[in-house]
Image: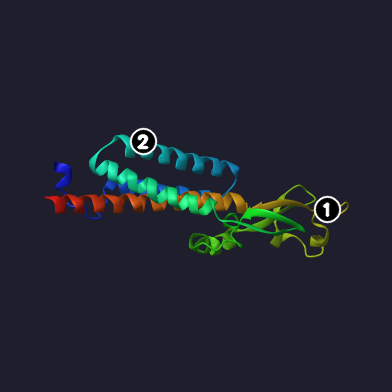
C-alpha cells in the first residue's frame, strides 16, 4: 500500500519538468506558425493522450487511475464546452450557425479572451509582389493596396493571413484542453491521497 502513504503534494519530477518545458516550446511554435500541418500534429497529440489516459482510467488502479480520471474529466469537459458554443448570426448577408470560439475576435470564453492579444500580435496579412516575393501588408506600397486583391493590373495578389485564425484557435483549444487535463490529473490525485489518509 505504498501508493497510499506518500503525501500527494505538488512535487514535480525532473522528467515531468522536462516534458512541460518541451510542451511549452512546441505549443509556442505551433501558435506562431499555425497552419493545417501544425493543427494536425497538435490535434493528434491531444487525441492520443486523451485515448491513452481514458484506457488507463478504465483498467488501472489507485493513484494512476485517479490521475487519469482527472485528466480525462478536465480535458473532456473543456472540449465539450468549447465545441458546444455555437451561435447563429449574419455572415456576409447569410444567417449561419458557427462556433464563435474558433474566431479570436468573436469568442467570449476566458480562454479565448486570454489568447486574443497573442493572436493580434502575431497576425498579419501577406501579399505576393510583382516579382513573386511574399511580403507583409506593411511592406506593400499604400497606392498598391487599392489593387492588392489580385485584380488585373494590380501587380500584387493577396496570399492569405498568418497565422490562420481558425487553425490558431483550434490549436489553442487543444493546448488548453491538455493544460486543464494536466491540472485535473493533479487535483484528482490530491483528492485520492486525502481520501486514503481519512480512511487510514
At label 2, counting other C-alpha atoms closer than 10 Å, the crowd grade (few under 14, some 14-19, many 20 or more) is: some
Q: Is residue 28 visible?
A: no
**Which is nearer the eye, 199 or 187?**
199
Q: Is residue 109 visible?
A: yes
Q: Quadrant of residue 38 in the image? A: top right
**Which is nearer the eye, 129 or 145?**
145
Q: Taking 40 as reference, is 130 left or right?
A: right
Q: Residue at x 38, y 45 (%)?
A: 72
- Callouts 2 and 1 close, C-beta under 8 Å: no
**Which is nearer the eye, 192 or 31?**
192
Q: Label 1, on which residue?
A: 155
| Rendered view: 188 above or below 108 | above
The label shown at residue 101 is: none
Spatial separation of the CA atoms under disc 2 and disc 1: 56 Å
Q: Position of residue 2 (x, y in %)?
A: 14, 42
Q: Residue at x 49, y 39 (%)?
A: 44
Q: Taking 37 as reference, is 45 left or right?
A: left
**Which is nearer the eye, 198 or 128?**
198
Q: Taking 136 as reference, is 7 left or right?
A: left
Q: Residue at x 30, y 54 (%)?
A: 187
Label 2 residue SS: helix
Q: Taking 175 as reference, is 150 left or right?
A: right
Label 1 residue SS: loop
Q: Position of residue 150 (x, y in %)?
A: 81, 51
The label shown at residue 55 is: 2
Count of marks placed on residues: 2
Q: Residue at x 36, y 35 (%)?
A: 55
At label 1, counting other C-alpha atoms closer than 10 Å, the crowd grade (few under 14, some 14-19, many 20 or more) is: some
In primary-sequence order, the first of circles 2 and 1 is 2
Q: Which is closer to the viewer, label 2 or label 1? A: 2
Screen quadrant of the N terminus: top left
Q: Position of residue 162 (x, y in %)?
A: 63, 53
Amino acid at each position: 500500500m505504498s501508493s497510499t502513504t506518500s503525501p500527494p503534494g505538488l512535487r514535480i519530477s525532473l522528467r515531468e519538468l522536462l516534458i512541460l518545458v518541451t510542451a511549452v516550446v512546441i505549443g509556442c511554435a505551433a501558435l506562431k506558425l499555425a497552419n493545417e500541418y501544425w493543427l494536425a500534429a497538435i490535434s493528434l497529440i491531444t487525441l492520443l493522450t486523451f485515448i491513452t489516459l481514458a484506457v488507463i482510467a478504465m483498467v488501472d488502479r489507485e493513484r494512476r487511475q485517479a490521475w487519469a480520471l482527472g485528466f480525462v474529466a478536465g480535458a473532456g469537459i473543456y472540449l465539450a464546452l468549447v465545441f458546444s458554443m455555437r451561435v447563429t448570426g449574419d455572415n456576409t448577408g447569410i444567417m449561419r450557425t458557427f462556433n464563435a470560439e474558433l474566431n479570436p475576435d468573436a469568442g467570449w470564453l476566458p480562454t479565448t479572451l486570454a489568447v486574443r492579444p497573442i493572436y493580434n500580435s502575431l497576425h498579419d496579412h501577406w501579399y505576393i509582389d510583382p516579382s513573386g516575393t511574399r511580403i507583409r501588408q506593411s511592406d506593400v506600397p499604400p497606392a498598391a493596396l487599392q489593387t492588392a486583391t489580385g485584380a488585373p493590373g494590380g501587380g500584387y495578389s493577396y496570399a492569405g493571413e498568418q497565422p490562420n485564425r481558425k487553425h490558431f484557435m483550434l490549436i489553442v483549444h487543444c493546448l488548453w484542453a491538455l493544460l486543464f487535463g494536466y491540472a485535473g490529473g493533479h487535483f484528482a490525485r490530491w483528492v485520492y491521497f486525502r481520501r486514503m489518509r481519512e480512511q487510514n
